[in-house]
Structure formats: structure tokens, C-alpha cells
Image: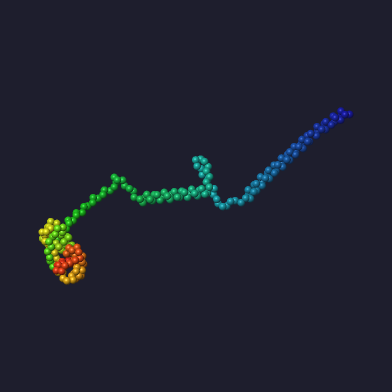
Amino acid sequence: MSENENRNRRPEESSKLPYLSLGVLVLMIAGLLYVGYEYIADDAADVDQLLNTPLDTTGRELQPIPYENNQLTTTSPTTKDNTETEAKEDKVTAATQEEDLLASPTPRPADEEEPKKAEEKVPEKPKETAKPVAVNPGGIEITHTVQSGETFYGIANRYNLKSGTLKGINPDIKDENTDVKSGVTRIKVRVQAVHTVGPGDILRVVAEKYGITVQQLMAANKKTKNFTERGEKLIIPFPEKK
């Protein structure tokens, strides 16, 4: 009995194996289908999100990415503005330098300098010698003998006369340097008057009387001290040069 029962059980057990395998396969297929459904659902959600996202209407344009030496370089907006500002400043500086060069005169080489015009020599006018003037300034005429150290012009200043007037009075004197000799030459001089000193005639009183200064009175009479004596003859020059 035991051997027959064992034989009957083995076929039954072997017949159950295909059903178990089939059940396992069904479970595996179901799991795969579930996983695939979740993946497809996620993709569909991403697509819906992309479709529902509003478009950017700010109008920004894509800026080209600059390349330098076949290398990608990124430039921020601030760097770009700084670069444009520096470029403008360089242009302004270059324009200013060009204007300065145009405004400044270009120096010519020494070989290209224009020949200077020869200065025209203006003929010098011959010195005009004062011609004797025959004048009569008035007053009275006296004679003066040239003393040592005196000159023709010094005598004219002593008597408050112009040199031309003194030459006019003395036409015989051609050259003041050679014709005027000390102790020899007698020069005619015209003066306002000749005053004889009386009682109380001090130099100040005499000068006030003839409208001249004390210094002029002392110079005409070659005085070094403000002193006079009674009976002395004082030469009275003109108050202004004649």
C-alpha cells in the first residue's frame, strides 16, 4: 500500500509546478505594468506643467556669447557697461589729442624756415646843430668872461637862459667846445636887471622884489652863502628860461 500511494502522489506534485510558475510570471508582469504606468504618469505631469507655464513676454533678446581665442567668455552686464564707458572715454581722449595737434602750430625744420627779410636800414638823420637864433629876450645885456671850468651850457643855466638863446646872442661862437676858452672868451648875456644892494636889501628881499627865488639869485651871482653887502651889484636873472 505504501508504494502505491507514493507513486500516486508524485504525479500530482509534478502537475502543480506549471501553475506556480505561471502565477509567478503573472505577478511579475503585473508589477512591471504598474511601474511603467507610474513612469508614464510622471512624464504626462511634466508635459502638462510645461504646457501650462506662461511664456516670458519681457522681450529680452538672447545675447550672443562672445568668443575670444576660441574660448567661451561670459560678460556680465556691469562689465559690459564699464567696457563701453572706457571705449567712449578712449574715443573722447583721442579726439581731444587730435584737436590739440591740429590747433598747435607744427614747428618747421630749420631748413624750411622762411628767410627773414633783410631789415631795411633807415638812414640816420644827421644831428641837427642848433642854429643861432637872433632873439632879444629883453632885459639888459652884460658881458661874462669865461672862467676856469665853465662851459657854454653851464653859463646859459647860470643866467637861466636857453642855449639857443645864448647862441643867438653870440652868433660869432660857432663851436661851443673850441670857441669857448677860459679867461679869453667874452660872452654876451642878457639878464632881467642889475641891482645895487641898499640898506636892508637882503637876498630874500631882493628876490621877492624881482619875482625870483633866492636859489636863482645865488646861482646867477655864484654865491655859496645867503649874504650880501651894501653897494654890491647883484645880477637878476629871468624868472623863467628865455
Query: Residue 90 location, x and y as percent?
Result: 44, 48
> What residue sits 35% from the left and 50% below the top?
104
169, above or below 105, in the image:
below
Quadrant containing the N terminus is: top right
Residue 181 vs residue 119, the one in the foreground: 181
Query: Residue 169 location, x and y as percent?
Result: 13, 63
Asked whether, in this view, residue 187 is left or right of residue 38, the answer is left
Which quadrant holds residue 152?
Answer: bottom left
Quadrant containing the C terminus is: bottom left
Asked whether, in this view, residue 15 is left or right of residue 202, the answer is right
**Residue 176 visible within the image:** no
Residue 231 vs residue 6, the one in the foreground: 231
Query: Residue 227 location, x and y as percent?
Result: 19, 66
> What residue sits 23% from the left and 51% below the top?
119
Q: How many marks?
A: 0
> What residue sits 20% from the left and 70% below the top?
205
Query: Residue 200 location, x and y as percent?
Result: 18, 71
Which quadrant holds residue 161?
Answer: bottom left
> What residue sits 43% from the left and 50% below the top?
92
**Residue 50 visible within the image:** yes
Residue 190 vs residue 200, the one in the foreground: 200
61, above or below 212, in the image:
above
